[in-house]
Amino acid sequence: MKSEKIKIKVDDEYVSGVVSTPDHLNVNSRTGMVFAHGAGNDMNHPLLVSVSEGLAEQGFITLRFNFPYKEKGIKRPDPQGKLIQTWLCAYDFLKSGYIYKTDKIIAVGKSMGGRVASQMVAQGLMDVDRLIFLGYPLHAPGKKDKLKDAHLYNIKIPVLFFAGTRDSLCNLSRLNSVLDKLICKWDLEIIDGGDHSFKLLKSDPRTQKDVQIQVLSKCLDWLKTD
């Protein structure tokens, strides 16, 4: 597996990205996977790096990228329109065949990155084959009765949710009630003891590497399903 740093043009500026490719192409190499980070981190979050590189080792072509505000070192996320535009530019970059021609694109998002991707898919703004949520921000902390779920019911492509049992932004009971009403095919993988970023308590005998392996393994199994 090898990784290459690239730049993606977004309007009149550029954002950083990393494309990871396998040493030897295989049947998986016809599928590209674009990874978007969450509000409080960037494309170099350990989970995104581990999963994107792990998938590339299995043949997939992966791209992770920064949103403009992170590129500039700003804490406050960009406006929704800019987030959408950046997602589209990253999608177009991989879809264009700059690295290798792909037939399918799968959108992968951590928290905010996944939420924006799902809103785009629901509105018909981005044509992807599947969605993977590495922690979905279903509600604000302490406000589990005010769900950010309306657009999810318009999604028709397969979706894979990962959720930690200690996630303050995604109550599992509330999430299950949402899943029961989705019209798309969905799957849910629980990260026992994980918070919104799947971070474990210090008392947990497992390591973060164990969690990364769990996430990667589930992704690979799910990608084999119809």
Image: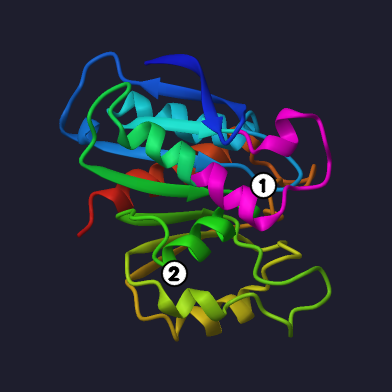
Q: Quadrant of residue 205?
A: top right
| Along the viewing direction, whichever of 126 and 10 lies nearer the viewer | 10
Magenta residues, start to end: 66-87
Left or right, 85 with reference to 142: left
> Which quadrant would residue 191 be assigned to in this image?
bottom right
Would residue 116 appear left or right of 45 to someone viewing this image? left
Q: Position of residue 70 (x, y in %)?
A: 73, 34
Image x and y of residue 10, in percent: 56, 35
Q: Amino acid at mark 2?
A: Ala
Determine which residue is flagged by label 2.
Answer: 122
Q: Which mark is residue 116?
A: none
Label 2: state its secondary structure: helix
Colour scheme of this structure image? rainbow
Residue at 68% x, 36% y is: 68
Q: Amino acid at mark 1?
A: Gly
**Residue pointed to by mark 1:** 38
Between residue 132 and residue 128, name the one nearer to us: 128
The 10 Å Cα crowd at callout 1, few under 14, some 14 to 19, many 20 or more, is many
- At x 74%, y 38%, the residue is 69
Residue at 20 percent of width and 41 percent of height: 103
Lower sequence index among marks 1 and 2 = 1
Q: How many marks?
A: 2
Mark 2, other Cα within 10 Å: few <14 / some 14–19 / many ≥20: some
- Element at badge 1? loop
